[in-house]
Amino acid sequence: MKKWIIAGSLVVVLASCKMQEAAQENAASSPQKSKAKKSAPASQDQLKAGIPESKVKNFNKLDANKDEKLSLEEFTQTVKTSFEKKGDTSDAYKAEAKKRFKRRDQNKDAALSLEEFAGAPSKGGAPAAQKTASTASGVPEAKVKIFKKLDANSDGKLSVEEFTVTVKNSFIKKGDTSDAYKAAAKKRFKNRDKNGDGVLSLEEFAGVSEMPSLPPQ
């Protein structure tokens, strides 16, 4: 009889130990599962082919009302911040923001999609898409080099002001230090601006019959 009682007690003790071990394992695994869920990036569903995750995160940060579009006001914040980092606390950022916004707003809907925002040039060079187009277009490397040299803000296009630099330099080399270069620059720019959008693409710039000179260092 005593043997049966002892055996029964052992069974109860073992069962209790197994239940405690199971409870501890569940408790240990629960935080890990919860943590795994929290670690998943919230913007993962927004990632598109060719768009760096860093730009997606920046876009989400600027998108204050979370409508997956950037208004001019929202976009202006990043331009303002970049000006302040350079020590410029004036209102100059407002005009620059409008200029950059207009250039990126490809479909002219007064808002920037993630794709339009991501197409913005990165610091220190033209966008990857522009570099690919330059290579595929068959434009001589020498002209590509000059184009990039003139493209002061690296937006992949030349404004009248940027193009004027090379015309002014060519006049100076000829010994002409008057303001005659300004009229000449406007005339040449207009002849090259085939689509009349007020800027020169690489193809429009490379279509010139005469190789322009590099601006002074």
Image (spheres, rainbow, N blue to C red):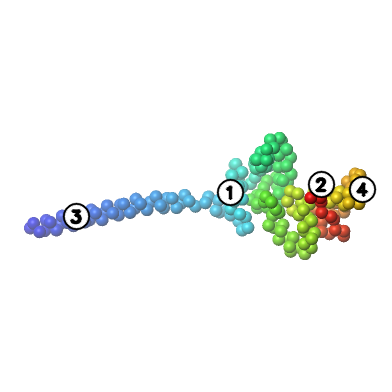
Q: Amino acid at mark 3?
A: Val
Q: Give the distance between the C-alpha atoms of the residues marked 4 and 1, in whole angstroms.
A: 51 Å
Crowding at dot 1, Cα within 10 Å, few <14 / some 14-19 / many 20+, comes out as some
Residue under label 4, please give it.
176
- The tag earlier along the polypeptide, 3 or 4, is 3
Percent position (x, y) of residue 54?
59, 51
Q: Dots 2 and 1: beta carbons under 8 Å?
A: no
Crowding at dot 4, Cα within 10 Å, few <14 / some 14-19 / many 20+, comes out as few
Q: Amino acid at mark 2?
A: Glu
Q: Give the distance between the C-alpha atoms of the residues marked 2 and 1, in whole angstroms.
A: 34 Å
Q: Give the distance between the C-alpha atoms of the residues marked 1 and 3, in whole angstroms.
A: 56 Å
Q: Nearer the viewer, residue 78 or 74?
A: 78
Q: Give the distance between the C-alpha atoms of the residues marked 3 and 2, in whole angstroms.
A: 90 Å
Check residue 12 in the rendering and tell me which mark sits there, or answer none: 3
Residue under label 2, please give it.
161
Percent position (x, y) of residue 87?
68, 38
- The tag earlier along the polypeptide, 1 or 3, is 3
- The tag earlier along the polypeptide, 2 or 4, is 2
Q: Nearer the viewer, residue 159 or 124?
A: 124
Residue at point 61%, 47% (across, down): 59
Residue under label 1, please give it.
57
Secondary structure under badge 2?
helix
Q: Dots 4 and 1: beta carbons under 8 Å?
A: no
Image position of 134 with respect to 28: above or below: below
**Given this view, does label 1 or label 3 mark the residue nearer the observer?**
1
Residue 184 visible from this viewpoint: no
